[in-house]
Image (tube, grey):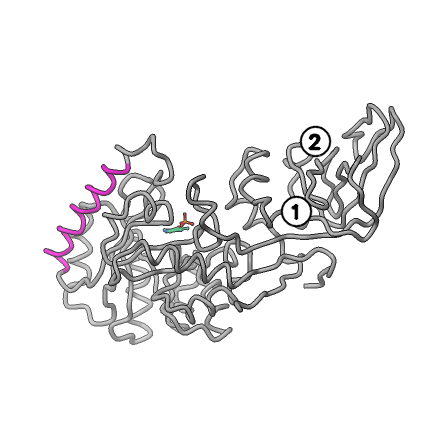
Amino acid sequence: MPQSRDTVLEIDLGALAHNYRFLRDRLRPETRFLGVVKAYGYGSDSLAIALKLEALGADYLAVAFTDEGTFLREGGVRLPILVLHPQPSGLDDLITHRLEPALYSLRILKMFLETARRREARGFPVHLKFNTGLNRLGFWENDVEWIAGQLEGESSLTIRSAFSHLAASDDPGSNTFTQRQIKSFAAIVADIREQLPGTPFFHLLNTSGILNFPDAQWDMVRSGIGLYGYGNDPEVDPLLRPVARLRTRISQLHKIEPGEWVGYNKGYRAADFRTTATLPIGHADGIGRIYGKEHGAFHVRGKRAPIIGNVCMDMTMIDVTGIPCKEGDEVVVFGNGHSAEDLARGAGTISYELLTGISRRVAREILEEH
Ligand SMILES: *Cc1c(COP(=O)(O)O)cnc(C)c1O
């Protein structure tokens, strides 16, 4: 993918190490740690993140789809990789690359069982995903008996773990709901211990679960956003370090006269004399139109510069009136105290969406831990 070297996403592996240790320190020492590297490592660089997590001592990785796991294997990642949402088209690849599927439905369990038998797999590791209230993906508690029946005497597969996912672990207002999910998972764990007694471990918590419901850590936790430096919590955020920093440069400065328009469809009209900067980053790079019309701001020399008018495909215009700057100067899109969370919130979205949307046209620069 051809990339511009003026718009760069810096990936700070030292920050990743810091966040990993911060989260790890909140867990019981024997709890396993799974690092979630789906969606290209939350938009950063999944291979660099995965290799670093491996070096830091993480126990597991997870991706959403099979090809994301294949990419990591081809890059030399050796940790066990859980594939959270495997699709029928990639079941053979799971076996080829020793990627461990989450089996979440009667259909996918049957299909994977057939694939494993055809490939003459022996004890291939799989995980069972249960629905406890998110109502998105997973078996129901009363499927345990059916699963046990399907796998009785089966030598091609081994159940490695069973897990569920919290719907609102970041929201204190949903505490009662989350406690209900935890109880419901505990009931599933009890059923599995009885009916699938070889199942070695259980897990429920994502990042906000680790922070808010540490008693429910069972044998492993699955953290994504926290590793990347965001805790969904204003008290925790300052203790984490954002891994990704997105910077660009001023291409051109414009003096705008009162009454003039800026950008496509006359998205902005100057009420007085303004100075605008045109930047080589646009919605094709992941800065969506929702950030336009002053719903988002970047930073130039530490000062806030609102996005004016409509974000274009390859360019964005910001208002730099009163900020001493020149063409070629650096602009911070997010990072360095101007967090992706703040930028996202201003436009009514969340850090997850902003981070994962940074397109592959933006060059990645890996900063090693030192
Ligand atoms: C994405 C995902 C996670 C990670 O969640 P964070 O909020 O980013 O920590 C954990 N578990 C499952 C099943 C997921 O899909």
Q: Taking 272 as reference, is 234 left or right?
A: left
Seen at 16% across and 54% down, the residue is 192
Where does label 1 land, which residue? 333
> Is the N terminus in the top left, top right, bottom left or bottom right quadrant?
bottom right
Residue matched to label 2: 293
Q: Give the residue at x 72% y 46%.
A: 301
* Dot 2 amino acid type: Lys
Kind of element beneath mark 2? loop
Q: CA distance from mark 2 to mark 1?
A: 16 Å
Which residue is located at x 81 percent, y 26 percent? 269
Nearest the eye: 139 or 204:
204
Q: Is mark 2 within 8 Å of ligand 1?
A: no
Label 1 lies in ligand 1 vicinity (Cβ under 8 Å): no
Q: Return the residue nearer the eye: 70 or 308.
A: 308
Query: Answer yes or no: do the residues labelled 2 and 1 have beta carbons within 8 Å?
Result: no
User: Based on the displayed image, in which of its 4 quarters is residue 132 positioned?
Assistant: top left
Q: Nearer the viewer, residue 314 or 258?
A: 258
Residue 59 vs residue 30: left or right? Answer: right
Q: Tell how many labels.
A: 2
Residue 346 inside the magenta-drawn segment: no
Q: Give the x, y percent position of residue 7.
A: 71, 55
Examine the rendered structure and indicate whether residue 261 appears above or below residue 283: above
Q: Earlier in the sequence, mark 2 or mark 1?
A: 2
Magenta stretch, main secondary structure class: helix
Q: Is residue 180 magenta?
A: yes
Q: Nearer the viewer, mark 2 or mark 1?
A: 1
Residue 50 % position (x, y)? 46, 66
Q: Which residues are magenta?
A: 178-196
Amino acid carrying mark 1 in the image: Val
The x, y position of residue 179, in whole percent, is 24, 38
Image quadrant in which you'd find residue 83: bottom left
